Amino acid sequence: MDQIAYFEQMRQKRRNEILTTAKEMILNDSLAAFTMQGLAQTLDISTVTLYKYYKNSTAVIDDLYQCTLQQIQCLPDFYPSEEDSLEAALQCVSLCLDELTDQLDNLRLAIILGSYTYQKKEKTVFISFQFLSDYLHKHFEPILYDALEQNSLNTVFSPSDITSQIADICASFIQFTALQKTGPGKEITKKIEGQKTALLHQIRNILLNNI
């Protein structure tokens, strides 16, 4: 590795440390209490060093927001292991919910940072779940078309419309879950699992009315 690449790698490492610390501070305290001075103190570095990486707290917030969105939107490809179209469809939705509920801190952070970022830009949408809709249209919708070809889908709605409905339901659930007050680890996990099971049951009923 040449010297330039080495220094760039070290710079990126330090930048990641800054963003990780900023994330913890914002989630544990508040965005209103977040300052460059406080961040530097927590990192045990001088503010002069910190300003070499970010010119102000807004730059930290913007970078953290974009990095957080990238992490949230990175969902794995879905390969159904179920032959039954209903079970395969539910398996796809379950995968999405599992992946996103494993990232509740990131989702909560994105909502917090999004409200700040978009207020600055005079917009009203804090976080877009278009990525979730795109994912379900890519993986969930073809399962419904398979069901249609097998004559097991009997509905006046198109698979695309059904998928959009499911995507909206899942997005609302994820947002609600991310904004809930946290509690003891096992307690909150059990609560979320119960809510997720109830949602999958609701989606099953929606599909049973169409499949």
Image (spheres, helix red, strand yellow):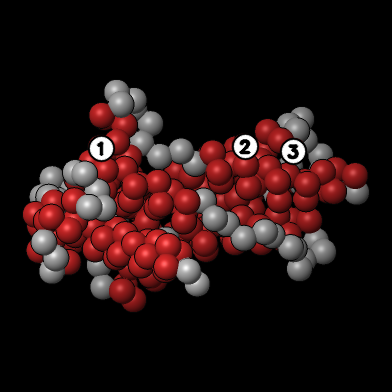
Nearer-the-camera pick, 77 or 159: 77
Label 1 neighbour load within 10 Å: few <14, some 14-19, many 20+: some
Q: Is residue 193 visible?
A: no
> Which residue is drawn at the image coordinates 52% and 63% (left, top)?
98
> Residue 12: where, in percent of width, then height?
37, 61
Instruction: Identify residue for label 3.
Output: 159
Instruction: Identify residue for label 2.
Output: 164
> Residue 9: where, in percent of width, then height?
41, 65
For residue 145, above or below residue 192: above
Callout 1: helix, strand or loop?
A: helix
For residue 145, above or below residue 89: above
> Residue 28: where, in percent of width, then height?
18, 61
Which sits earlier in the primary sequence, circle 3 or circle 1?
Answer: 1
> Which residue is drawn at the image coordinates 74% and 56% (left, top)?
86
Name the amino acid, label 2.
Ser
Name the amino acid, label 1.
Tyr
> Which residue is drawn at the image coordinates 42% and 62% (left, top)?
4
Name the amino acid, label 3.
Pro
Q: Is residue 195 visible?
A: yes
Label 3 neighbour load within 10 Å: few <14, some 14-19, many 20+: many
Callout 2: helix, strand or loop?
A: helix
Instruction: Identify residue for label 1.
Output: 116
Nearer-the-camera pick, 131 or 136: 131
Which sits earlier in the primary sequence, circle 2 or circle 3?
Answer: 3
